[in-house]
Image (cartoon, grey):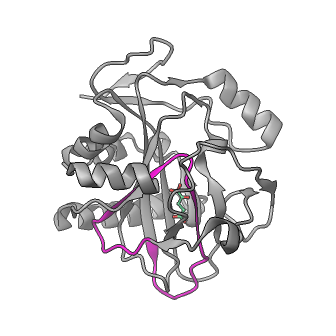
């Protein structure tokens, strides 16, 4: 659980590093599971491996940890769907950058009331390309115009130019293993490439309130029109509460 002051920080900045650390034993298990996962699936790009549930449903056990859901519930309400999972497990050599972007422009969720939980599996520092955010850039809930960039040096193909004079100084999200960073769908964020020699793994789960609709038709359209990954077939999981919007087809997680 977090205090009211923390909720206010999240609302004001669009990002929060809550004052909790997940159990080191859990994190060690995740580290080992992650290593096996990438050995078993060598075709995956570690810098950005999406939809972990498709390969192994048991990742949902981490997404459903009580410590995490209690905080998510304070931010988006008690009816929680987890609709996305990914690793940004940047190896530390030959790494790709995460361009400045807003998650909101990729997601077929209506309304777009979602949050991302980025779990540090390794240390994340300035040197190994920690997540960076532009505090407050989510506030107007405005979609900034992204440009298409298919460079192989980027993990995403839509990018924003973020002049400091306009957007202010980015915040480095420096984390120890087991710490979390939570961000709003509209915040501008990114990360430098990691060529530090030290792995920087973030395990990411994305949550939406079950009052929102995960619109599969819109996902197909967005993929066709924007050339982004098609998420229309994703399994989505009700982790807490009830599926308020009957438009969602969810798996019940118990
Ligand atoms: O970890 C990264 O490099 C990027 C993470 C990100 O963009 C996200 O979680 O939305």
Most foreground residue, 35 or 236:
236
Residue 4 location, x and y as percent?
A: 23, 48
Most foreground residue, 12 or 210:
12
Most foreground residue, 221 or 185:
185
Residue 189 location, x and y as percent?
A: 57, 61
Residue, x 74% and y 65% (percent of image)? 161
The number of discs equals 0
Please check the rendered image and state whether residue 182 is part of the magenta-colored stretch, yes or no. yes
Q: Tell me the magenta residue range.
A: 173-200
Residue, x 26% and y 42% (percent of image)? 69
**Rendered image quadrant of residue 245:** top left
Query: Quadrant location of the C terminus?
Result: top left
Residue 57 location, x and y as percent?
A: 38, 40
In screen coordinates, is 188 left or right of 175? right
Please check the rendered image and state whether residue 250 is part of the magenta-colored stretch, yes or no. no
Q: Is residue 17 above or below residue 187?
A: below
Residue, x 21% and y 61% (percent of image)? 20
In screen coordinates, is 108 left or right of 200? right
Q: Farthest top residue? A: 246
In screen coordinates, is 90 left or right of 224? left
Q: What secondary structure predominates along the stretch shown in magenta? A: loop
Residue 7 location, x and y as percent?
A: 30, 49
Residue, x 64% and y 65% (percent of image)? 167
**Rendered image quadrant of residue 169:** bottom right
């Amino acid at each position: 659980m977090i205090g009211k002051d923390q909720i206010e920080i999240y609302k004001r900045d669009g990002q929060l590093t809550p004052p909790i650390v997940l159990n080191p034993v859990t994190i060690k298990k995740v580290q080992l599971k992650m290593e096996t996962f990438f050995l078993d699936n060598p075709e995956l790009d570690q810098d950005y491996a999406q939809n972990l549930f498709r390969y192994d449903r048991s990742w949902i056990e981490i997404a459903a940890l009580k410590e995490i859901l209690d905080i998510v519930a304070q931010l988006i309400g008690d009816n929680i769907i987890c609709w996305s999972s990914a690793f940004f497990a940047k190896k530390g050599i030959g790494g790709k950058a995460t361009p400045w972007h807003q998650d909101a422009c990729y997601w077929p969720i209506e309304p777009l009331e979602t949050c991302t939980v980025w779990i540090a599996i390794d240390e994340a520092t300035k040197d190994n390309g920690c997540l960076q955010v532009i505090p407050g850039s989510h506030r107007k809930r405005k979609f900034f115009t992204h440009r298409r960039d298919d460079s192989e040096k980027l993990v995403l193909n839509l990018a924003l130019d973020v002049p400091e004079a306009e957007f202010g100084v980015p915040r480095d999200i420096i984390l120890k293993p087991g710490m979390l960073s939570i961000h709003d769908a509209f915040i501008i964020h990114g990360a430098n490439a990691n060529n530090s020699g030290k792995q920087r793994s973030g395990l990411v789960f994305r949550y939406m309130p079950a009052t929102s609709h995960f619109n599969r038709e819109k996902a197909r359209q967005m993929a066709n029109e924007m050339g982004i990954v098609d998420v229309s077939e994703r399994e989505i999981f009700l982790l807490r509460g009830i599926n308020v919007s009957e438009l969602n087809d969810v798996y019940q997680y118990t």
